[in-house]
Amino acid sequence: MLTLQALRHDRPAVEAALSKRGLDAAPLLDQILELDLQRRTTQKEVDDLKAEQNAASRAIGDLFKAGKKEEAESRRAEVGLLKERIQALDEKQKALIQQQEDALLELPNRPHESVPSGQSEEDNEVVAEEGDKPNLGDSAKPHWELADQYKLIDFEAGVKISGAGFPVYRGKGAKLQRALIQFFLDRADAAGYEEFIPPHVVNADSGRGTGQLPDKEGQMYHCTEDDLYLIPTAEVPLTNLFRGDLLKSDELPIQLCGYTPCFRREAGSYGKDVRGLNRLHQFDKVEIVRFEKPENSYAALDGMVEHVRGLLRELELPFRTLRLCGGDLGFTSALTFDLEVWSAAQERWLEVSSVSNFETYQANRLQCRFRNAEGKPELVHTLNGSALALPRIVAALLENHQTADGIRIPAALQPYTGFDRIA
Protein backbone atom coordinates (compact mmCIF):
# COMPACT_ATOMS: atom_id res chain seq x y z
CA MET A 1 0.00 0.00 0.00
CA LEU A 2 1.04 3.61 -0.40
CA THR A 3 2.91 5.11 2.54
CA LEU A 4 1.30 7.74 4.74
CA GLN A 5 4.42 9.86 4.35
CA ALA A 6 3.82 10.04 0.59
CA LEU A 7 0.17 11.01 1.10
CA ARG A 8 1.00 13.67 3.68
CA HIS A 9 3.86 15.33 1.83
CA ASP A 10 3.13 14.63 -1.83
CA ARG A 11 -0.64 14.46 -2.08
CA PRO A 12 -1.02 16.48 -5.34
CA ALA A 13 1.46 14.20 -7.14
CA VAL A 14 -0.21 11.05 -5.77
CA GLU A 15 -3.65 12.30 -6.82
CA ALA A 16 -2.41 13.22 -10.30
CA ALA A 17 -0.70 9.85 -10.77
CA LEU A 18 -3.79 7.92 -9.67
CA SER A 19 -5.86 9.87 -12.18
CA LYS A 20 -3.99 7.89 -14.89
CA ARG A 21 -6.00 4.92 -13.67
CA GLY A 22 -9.20 6.87 -14.24
CA LEU A 23 -9.57 7.11 -10.47
CA ASP A 24 -10.79 10.18 -8.59
CA ALA A 25 -8.80 9.48 -5.44
CA ALA A 26 -9.67 12.76 -3.67
CA PRO A 27 -12.50 11.37 -1.44
CA LEU A 28 -10.45 8.40 -0.27
CA LEU A 29 -7.35 10.55 0.28
CA ASP A 30 -9.46 12.99 2.30
CA GLN A 31 -10.71 10.11 4.44
CA ILE A 32 -7.23 8.65 5.00
CA LEU A 33 -5.66 11.99 5.91
CA GLU A 34 -8.55 12.90 8.24
CA LEU A 35 -8.18 9.56 10.01
CA ASP A 36 -4.44 10.19 10.22
CA LEU A 37 -5.06 13.59 11.81
CA GLN A 38 -7.47 12.08 14.33
CA ARG A 39 -4.99 9.30 15.11
CA ARG A 40 -2.14 11.73 15.72
CA THR A 41 -4.36 14.03 17.80
CA THR A 42 -5.51 11.07 19.89
CA GLN A 43 -1.92 9.91 20.34
CA LYS A 44 -0.95 13.34 21.63
CA GLU A 45 -3.84 13.21 24.13
CA VAL A 46 -2.65 9.80 25.30
CA ASP A 47 0.95 11.00 25.63
CA ASP A 48 -0.14 14.10 27.60
CA LEU A 49 -2.33 12.06 29.93
CA LYS A 50 0.43 9.52 30.52
CA ALA A 51 2.82 12.35 31.39
CA GLU A 52 0.20 13.71 33.81
CA GLN A 53 -0.27 10.22 35.25
CA ASN A 54 3.47 9.77 35.79
CA ALA A 55 3.74 13.17 37.47
CA ALA A 56 0.79 12.37 39.72
CA SER A 57 2.30 9.00 40.67
CA ARG A 58 5.56 10.66 41.66
CA ALA A 59 3.63 13.26 43.70
CA ILE A 60 1.74 10.48 45.52
CA GLY A 61 5.04 8.86 46.43
CA ASP A 62 6.31 12.14 47.81
CA LEU A 63 3.10 12.63 49.86
CA PHE A 64 3.42 9.17 51.41
CA LYS A 65 7.04 9.90 52.27
CA ALA A 66 5.93 13.16 53.88
CA GLY A 67 3.34 11.29 55.94
CA LYS A 68 0.39 12.89 54.15
CA LYS A 69 -1.47 9.62 53.70
CA GLU A 70 -4.97 11.08 53.34
CA GLU A 71 -3.93 13.49 50.62
CA ALA A 72 -1.99 10.73 48.85
CA GLU A 73 -5.07 8.47 48.81
CA SER A 74 -7.12 11.30 47.35
CA ARG A 75 -4.60 11.74 44.54
CA ARG A 76 -4.77 7.99 43.86
CA ALA A 77 -8.41 8.36 42.88
CA GLU A 78 -7.36 11.02 40.35
CA VAL A 79 -4.77 8.63 38.87
CA GLY A 80 -7.49 5.99 38.53
CA LEU A 81 -9.58 8.39 36.48
CA LEU A 82 -6.57 9.18 34.30
CA LYS A 83 -6.06 5.44 33.67
CA GLU A 84 -9.67 5.08 32.55
CA ARG A 85 -9.34 8.02 30.15
CA ILE A 86 -6.10 6.60 28.74
CA GLN A 87 -7.70 3.19 28.25
CA ALA A 88 -10.66 4.71 26.41
CA LEU A 89 -8.33 6.71 24.17
CA ASP A 90 -6.22 3.61 23.49
CA GLU A 91 -9.35 1.81 22.26
CA LYS A 92 -10.23 4.80 20.10
CA GLN A 93 -6.68 4.80 18.74
CA LYS A 94 -6.89 1.11 17.80
CA ALA A 95 -10.16 1.71 15.94
CA LEU A 96 -8.70 4.69 14.06
CA ILE A 97 -5.60 2.71 13.05
CA GLN A 98 -7.77 -0.13 11.74
CA GLN A 99 -10.02 2.26 9.80
CA GLN A 100 -6.99 3.98 8.33
CA GLU A 101 -5.39 0.69 7.29
CA ASP A 102 -8.64 -0.53 5.73
CA ALA A 103 -8.86 2.70 3.73
CA LEU A 104 -5.21 2.46 2.63
CA LEU A 105 -5.81 -1.09 1.41
CA GLU A 106 -8.48 0.25 -0.96
CA LEU A 107 -5.99 2.61 -2.60
CA PRO A 108 -4.12 1.19 -5.63
CA ASN A 109 -0.47 1.84 -6.34
CA ARG A 110 0.68 5.09 -7.88
CA PRO A 111 1.59 4.53 -11.57
CA HIS A 112 5.14 5.26 -12.68
CA GLU A 113 5.57 8.47 -14.69
CA SER A 114 6.14 6.45 -17.87
CA VAL A 115 2.72 4.75 -17.67
CA PRO A 116 0.52 6.06 -20.50
CA SER A 117 -2.92 7.41 -19.70
CA GLY A 118 -5.83 5.32 -20.89
CA GLN A 119 -8.86 3.38 -19.76
CA SER A 120 -8.57 -0.08 -21.32
CA GLU A 121 -6.28 -2.52 -23.14
CA GLU A 122 -6.88 -0.61 -26.37
CA ASP A 123 -4.81 2.22 -24.87
CA ASN A 124 -1.77 0.07 -24.07
CA GLU A 125 1.45 1.09 -25.80
CA VAL A 126 3.19 -1.36 -28.14
CA VAL A 127 6.86 -1.06 -27.24
CA ALA A 128 8.28 -3.64 -29.64
CA GLU A 129 7.26 -6.50 -31.93
CA GLU A 130 9.57 -9.33 -32.91
CA GLY A 131 9.40 -12.42 -35.10
CA ASP A 132 7.54 -13.31 -38.27
CA LYS A 133 3.91 -14.37 -38.07
CA PRO A 134 3.50 -17.71 -39.89
CA ASN A 135 1.17 -17.73 -42.87
CA LEU A 136 -0.67 -21.03 -42.51
CA GLY A 137 -3.53 -20.27 -44.87
CA ASP A 138 -7.01 -21.69 -44.55
CA SER A 139 -5.71 -25.05 -43.36
CA ALA A 140 -4.60 -23.66 -39.98
CA LYS A 141 -6.28 -25.39 -37.04
CA PRO A 142 -6.81 -23.85 -33.59
CA HIS A 143 -4.97 -25.52 -30.73
CA TRP A 144 -8.04 -27.24 -29.31
CA GLU A 145 -8.52 -29.14 -32.60
CA LEU A 146 -4.83 -30.02 -32.75
CA ALA A 147 -4.90 -31.18 -29.12
CA ASP A 148 -7.79 -33.48 -29.96
CA GLN A 149 -6.26 -34.71 -33.23
CA TYR A 150 -2.96 -35.70 -31.62
CA LYS A 151 -4.49 -36.78 -28.28
CA LEU A 152 -2.59 -34.17 -26.25
CA ILE A 153 -5.32 -32.66 -24.08
CA ASP A 154 -8.70 -34.05 -23.03
CA PHE A 155 -10.96 -31.08 -22.30
CA GLU A 156 -14.09 -33.22 -21.87
CA ALA A 157 -12.46 -35.42 -19.23
CA GLY A 158 -11.51 -32.28 -17.32
CA VAL A 159 -15.13 -31.12 -17.38
CA LYS A 160 -16.27 -34.52 -16.08
CA ILE A 161 -13.71 -34.55 -13.27
CA SER A 162 -13.80 -30.91 -12.17
CA GLY A 163 -15.65 -28.63 -14.59
CA ALA A 164 -14.77 -26.30 -17.45
CA GLY A 165 -11.31 -24.75 -17.24
CA PHE A 166 -9.55 -27.84 -15.81
CA PRO A 167 -7.97 -29.67 -18.78
CA VAL A 168 -6.40 -33.12 -18.61
CA TYR A 169 -3.00 -33.36 -20.36
CA ARG A 170 -2.04 -36.76 -21.74
CA GLY A 171 0.73 -38.48 -23.69
CA LYS A 172 2.98 -36.05 -25.52
CA GLY A 173 0.79 -33.22 -24.29
CA ALA A 174 1.80 -34.06 -20.71
CA LYS A 175 5.44 -34.47 -21.75
CA LEU A 176 5.36 -31.09 -23.52
CA GLN A 177 3.96 -29.48 -20.38
CA ARG A 178 6.66 -31.04 -18.21
CA ALA A 179 9.39 -30.14 -20.71
CA LEU A 180 8.36 -26.47 -20.73
CA ILE A 181 8.41 -26.29 -16.93
CA GLN A 182 11.95 -27.70 -16.76
CA PHE A 183 13.09 -25.50 -19.64
CA PHE A 184 11.81 -22.35 -17.89
CA LEU A 185 13.32 -23.37 -14.54
CA ASP A 186 16.72 -24.12 -16.11
CA ARG A 187 16.78 -20.75 -17.85
CA ALA A 188 15.82 -19.00 -14.59
CA ASP A 189 18.58 -20.85 -12.75
CA ALA A 190 21.11 -19.78 -15.38
CA ALA A 191 19.95 -16.16 -14.90
CA GLY A 192 20.68 -16.32 -11.17
CA TYR A 193 17.24 -17.08 -9.73
CA GLU A 194 17.17 -19.50 -6.79
CA GLU A 195 14.46 -22.15 -7.13
CA PHE A 196 11.85 -22.68 -4.41
CA ILE A 197 8.93 -25.07 -4.08
CA PRO A 198 6.43 -23.09 -1.97
CA PRO A 199 3.05 -24.10 -0.52
CA HIS A 200 0.10 -23.97 -2.90
CA VAL A 201 -2.22 -22.49 -0.28
CA VAL A 202 -1.67 -19.30 1.72
CA ASN A 203 -3.25 -17.56 4.67
CA ALA A 204 -5.04 -14.22 4.53
CA ASP A 205 -1.98 -12.30 5.77
CA SER A 206 -0.02 -13.54 2.75
CA GLY A 207 -2.83 -12.53 0.41
CA ARG A 208 -2.92 -9.05 1.92
CA GLY A 209 0.87 -8.79 1.78
CA THR A 210 1.05 -9.03 -2.01
CA GLY A 211 -2.25 -7.25 -2.67
CA GLN A 212 -4.53 -10.10 -3.74
CA LEU A 213 -6.65 -9.32 -0.69
CA PRO A 214 -8.93 -7.50 -0.50
CA ASP A 215 -8.69 -6.53 -4.20
CA LYS A 216 -9.09 -9.98 -5.80
CA GLU A 217 -10.84 -11.86 -3.01
CA GLY A 218 -13.70 -12.97 -5.28
CA GLN A 219 -11.24 -14.35 -7.86
CA MET A 220 -9.46 -16.66 -5.40
CA TYR A 221 -10.54 -20.14 -4.37
CA HIS A 222 -11.13 -20.02 -0.61
CA CYS A 223 -10.99 -23.02 1.75
CA THR A 224 -13.41 -21.56 4.27
CA GLU A 225 -13.01 -24.14 7.03
CA ASP A 226 -9.27 -23.47 7.35
CA ASP A 227 -9.37 -19.88 6.03
CA LEU A 228 -6.73 -20.65 3.41
CA TYR A 229 -6.58 -19.54 -0.22
CA LEU A 230 -5.38 -21.50 -3.25
CA ILE A 231 -2.62 -19.45 -4.83
CA PRO A 232 -3.39 -17.54 -8.06
CA THR A 233 0.37 -17.29 -8.73
CA ALA A 234 3.65 -18.28 -7.09
CA GLU A 235 4.23 -14.55 -6.55
CA VAL A 236 2.17 -14.77 -3.36
CA PRO A 237 4.10 -17.40 -1.38
CA LEU A 238 7.50 -16.43 -2.81
CA THR A 239 7.17 -12.73 -1.96
CA ASN A 240 5.82 -13.54 1.50
CA LEU A 241 8.98 -15.47 2.34
CA PHE A 242 10.38 -12.13 3.52
CA ARG A 243 7.26 -10.66 5.15
CA GLY A 244 8.27 -8.76 8.28
CA ASP A 245 12.01 -9.13 7.61
CA LEU A 246 14.75 -6.53 7.93
CA LEU A 247 17.27 -7.52 5.27
CA LYS A 248 20.95 -6.68 5.18
CA SER A 249 22.03 -4.36 2.39
CA ASP A 250 24.45 -6.92 0.98
CA GLU A 251 21.65 -9.50 0.72
CA LEU A 252 20.07 -7.52 -2.12
CA PRO A 253 19.19 -8.22 -4.81
CA ILE A 254 17.30 -11.39 -3.92
CA GLN A 255 16.20 -13.40 -6.97
CA LEU A 256 13.69 -16.23 -6.58
CA CYS A 257 11.85 -18.51 -8.96
CA GLY A 258 9.31 -21.24 -8.53
CA TYR A 259 7.04 -23.54 -10.46
CA THR A 260 3.50 -23.98 -9.12
CA PRO A 261 0.03 -24.72 -10.32
CA CYS A 262 -2.11 -21.59 -10.21
CA PHE A 263 -5.83 -21.41 -9.37
CA ARG A 264 -8.13 -18.62 -10.52
CA ARG A 265 -11.92 -18.55 -10.43
CA GLU A 266 -12.00 -16.18 -13.45
CA ALA A 267 -15.55 -15.22 -12.48
CA GLY A 268 -17.44 -13.57 -15.33
CA SER A 269 -15.23 -15.00 -18.09
CA TYR A 270 -17.13 -16.45 -21.02
CA GLY A 271 -17.30 -16.52 -24.84
CA LYS A 272 -14.91 -17.47 -27.62
CA ASP A 273 -11.90 -15.91 -25.88
CA VAL A 274 -12.00 -18.59 -23.16
CA ARG A 275 -12.06 -21.61 -25.51
CA GLY A 276 -9.42 -24.31 -25.18
CA LEU A 277 -6.37 -23.13 -23.24
CA ASN A 278 -7.11 -19.43 -23.60
CA ARG A 279 -8.44 -19.01 -20.05
CA LEU A 280 -8.32 -21.69 -17.35
CA HIS A 281 -9.16 -22.12 -13.67
CA GLN A 282 -6.02 -24.21 -13.09
CA PHE A 283 -2.76 -23.86 -14.98
CA ASP A 284 1.00 -24.18 -14.48
CA LYS A 285 3.44 -21.30 -14.35
CA VAL A 286 7.06 -20.54 -13.55
CA GLU A 287 7.36 -17.23 -11.72
CA ILE A 288 10.41 -15.03 -11.14
CA VAL A 289 10.51 -12.61 -8.18
CA ARG A 290 13.06 -9.99 -7.16
CA PHE A 291 13.74 -7.86 -4.07
CA GLU A 292 15.78 -4.81 -5.02
CA LYS A 293 17.17 -1.57 -3.65
CA PRO A 294 14.98 1.26 -4.95
CA GLU A 295 17.72 2.76 -7.14
CA ASN A 296 18.19 -0.54 -8.98
CA SER A 297 14.63 -1.73 -9.47
CA TYR A 298 13.91 -0.29 -12.91
CA ALA A 299 17.12 -1.70 -14.37
CA ALA A 300 16.05 -5.02 -12.83
CA LEU A 301 12.64 -4.68 -14.47
CA ASP A 302 14.26 -4.20 -17.88
CA GLY A 303 16.38 -7.30 -17.24
CA MET A 304 13.31 -9.38 -16.35
CA VAL A 305 11.52 -8.29 -19.52
CA GLU A 306 14.56 -9.24 -21.58
CA HIS A 307 14.70 -12.61 -19.82
CA VAL A 308 11.13 -13.39 -20.93
CA ARG A 309 11.88 -12.17 -24.47
CA GLY A 310 14.81 -14.59 -24.58
CA LEU A 311 12.52 -17.50 -23.68
CA LEU A 312 10.09 -16.59 -26.46
CA ARG A 313 12.93 -16.30 -28.98
CA GLU A 314 14.14 -19.79 -28.07
CA LEU A 315 10.61 -21.10 -28.52
CA GLU A 316 10.58 -19.45 -31.98
CA LEU A 317 7.34 -17.60 -31.31
CA PRO A 318 6.45 -14.16 -32.72
CA PHE A 319 5.75 -11.81 -29.83
CA ARG A 320 5.22 -8.21 -28.86
CA THR A 321 5.85 -6.17 -25.71
CA LEU A 322 3.24 -3.79 -24.32
CA ARG A 323 3.51 -1.05 -21.71
CA LEU A 324 0.17 -1.11 -19.87
CA CYS A 325 -1.82 2.10 -19.60
CA GLY A 326 -3.16 3.37 -16.28
CA GLY A 327 -6.62 1.90 -16.80
CA ASP A 328 -5.27 -1.60 -17.52
CA LEU A 329 -2.58 -1.56 -14.83
CA GLY A 330 -2.86 -4.07 -12.01
CA PHE A 331 -3.96 -2.78 -8.59
CA THR A 332 -0.54 -3.19 -6.97
CA SER A 333 1.73 -2.35 -9.91
CA ALA A 334 3.61 0.87 -10.61
CA LEU A 335 4.66 -0.25 -14.10
CA THR A 336 3.84 -3.42 -16.04
CA PHE A 337 5.03 -4.82 -19.35
CA ASP A 338 2.88 -7.53 -20.90
CA LEU A 339 4.35 -9.94 -23.42
CA GLU A 340 1.98 -11.47 -25.95
CA VAL A 341 2.51 -14.24 -28.50
CA TRP A 342 0.79 -14.46 -31.85
CA SER A 343 -1.86 -17.14 -32.21
CA ALA A 344 -1.64 -18.16 -35.86
CA ALA A 345 -4.98 -19.98 -36.09
CA GLN A 346 -6.97 -17.59 -33.92
CA GLU A 347 -5.21 -14.63 -35.55
CA ARG A 348 -4.88 -12.66 -32.34
CA TRP A 349 -2.37 -11.89 -29.62
CA LEU A 350 -2.35 -13.97 -26.42
CA GLU A 351 -0.86 -12.64 -23.19
CA VAL A 352 1.72 -15.05 -21.77
CA SER A 353 3.60 -12.87 -19.28
CA SER A 354 3.21 -9.80 -17.11
CA VAL A 355 6.39 -8.32 -15.65
CA SER A 356 5.83 -5.67 -12.99
CA ASN A 357 7.62 -3.34 -10.60
CA PHE A 358 5.57 -2.71 -7.47
CA GLU A 359 8.12 -0.29 -6.01
CA THR A 360 7.39 -0.10 -2.23
CA TYR A 361 3.67 -0.91 -2.49
CA GLN A 362 3.92 -4.59 -1.57
CA ALA A 363 6.89 -4.05 0.74
CA ASN A 364 4.89 -1.57 2.83
CA ARG A 365 2.14 -4.16 3.27
CA LEU A 366 4.72 -6.87 3.98
CA GLN A 367 6.88 -4.61 6.17
CA CYS A 368 9.91 -5.89 4.28
CA ARG A 369 12.86 -3.51 4.70
CA PHE A 370 16.62 -3.34 4.37
CA ARG A 371 19.27 -1.20 6.05
CA ASN A 372 20.41 1.48 3.63
CA ALA A 373 23.87 3.09 3.41
CA GLU A 374 23.06 5.26 6.44
CA GLY A 375 22.04 2.18 8.42
CA LYS A 376 18.38 3.21 8.48
CA PRO A 377 15.52 0.80 7.66
CA GLU A 378 14.10 1.45 4.18
CA LEU A 379 11.40 -0.34 2.20
CA VAL A 380 12.65 -2.62 -0.58
CA HIS A 381 11.21 -2.64 -4.09
CA THR A 382 9.53 -5.90 -5.18
CA LEU A 383 9.15 -7.14 -8.76
CA ASN A 384 7.76 -10.24 -10.38
CA GLY A 385 7.04 -11.76 -13.75
CA SER A 386 5.66 -14.85 -15.47
CA ALA A 387 8.54 -16.74 -17.04
CA LEU A 388 6.32 -18.25 -18.28
CA ALA A 389 2.64 -19.19 -17.96
CA LEU A 390 2.12 -22.46 -19.84
CA PRO A 391 -1.40 -22.67 -21.31
CA ARG A 392 -1.16 -19.98 -23.99
CA ILE A 393 2.47 -20.91 -24.67
CA VAL A 394 1.29 -24.43 -25.43
CA ALA A 395 -1.55 -23.01 -27.57
CA ALA A 396 0.90 -20.84 -29.53
CA LEU A 397 3.41 -23.68 -29.98
CA LEU A 398 0.73 -25.99 -31.36
CA GLU A 399 -0.75 -23.37 -33.66
CA ASN A 400 2.39 -21.63 -34.94
CA HIS A 401 4.46 -24.78 -35.42
CA GLN A 402 1.80 -26.94 -37.06
CA THR A 403 2.75 -28.49 -40.40
CA ALA A 404 1.25 -31.02 -42.78
CA ASP A 405 3.37 -33.69 -41.05
CA GLY A 406 2.53 -32.77 -37.46
CA ILE A 407 3.69 -30.18 -34.92
CA ARG A 408 7.34 -29.17 -34.95
CA ILE A 409 9.13 -28.83 -31.59
CA PRO A 410 11.60 -25.89 -31.38
CA ALA A 411 15.24 -26.96 -31.24
CA ALA A 412 15.79 -25.46 -27.75
CA LEU A 413 12.96 -27.57 -26.35
CA GLN A 414 13.86 -30.90 -27.97
CA PRO A 415 16.39 -31.95 -25.26
CA TYR A 416 13.55 -31.60 -22.76
CA THR A 417 10.78 -33.34 -24.72
CA GLY A 418 12.90 -36.15 -26.14
CA PHE A 419 11.12 -35.79 -29.49
CA ASP A 420 11.29 -33.25 -32.30
CA ARG A 421 7.77 -33.60 -33.62
CA ILE A 422 4.26 -34.46 -32.53
CA ALA A 423 2.64 -36.62 -35.20
Image (tube, rainbow, N blue to C red):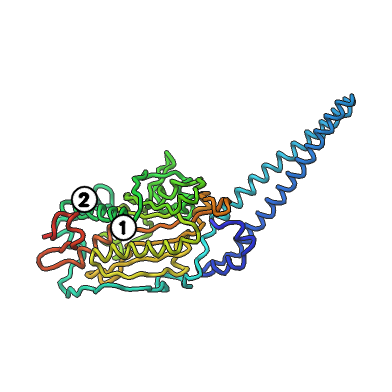
347 left or right of 228 in image: left
Q: Residue 73 location, x and y as percent?
A: 84, 27
The front one of 362 and 405 is 362
Mark 2, other Cα within 10 Å: few <14 / some 14–19 / many ≥20: some
- Residue 164 in sight here: no
Give the alpha-carbon distance from disc 1 to disc 2, as whole Å: 22 Å
Q: State left or right for residue 110 relative to residue 216.
A: right
The amino acid type of the residue labelled 1 equals: Ala
Nearer to us in this view, 188 or 162? 188
Image point 24% across, 73% down: which residue? 133
Task: Determine whether the residue tagged by mark 2 lies in a helix, strand or loop.
Answer: helix
Q: Which residue is mark 1?
A: 389
Up-down: is 10 above or below 201?
A: below
Up-down relation of residue 319 to residue 65 (above or below) = below
- Residue 92 lies left or right of residue 206; in this view the side is right
Q: Quadrant of residue 312?
A: bottom left
| Nearer-N-terminus badge (1/2) | 2
Image quadrant where one finds the C terminus? bottom left
* Residue 285, numbered circle: none
Secondary structure found at label 1: strand
Establish if 296 lies above or below 52.
Answer: below
Q: Amino acid at mark 2?
A: Ala
- Find residue 359 and report its horizontal and vertical position in percent: 49, 59
**Where does the image place residue 221, in percent across and percent down from the top left?**
39, 48
Q: Give the image quarter of residue 131.
A: bottom left
The residue lying toward the viewer, choosing from 3 and 299, is 299
Which residue, given by chain and number where applicable, does mark 2 sit on? 157
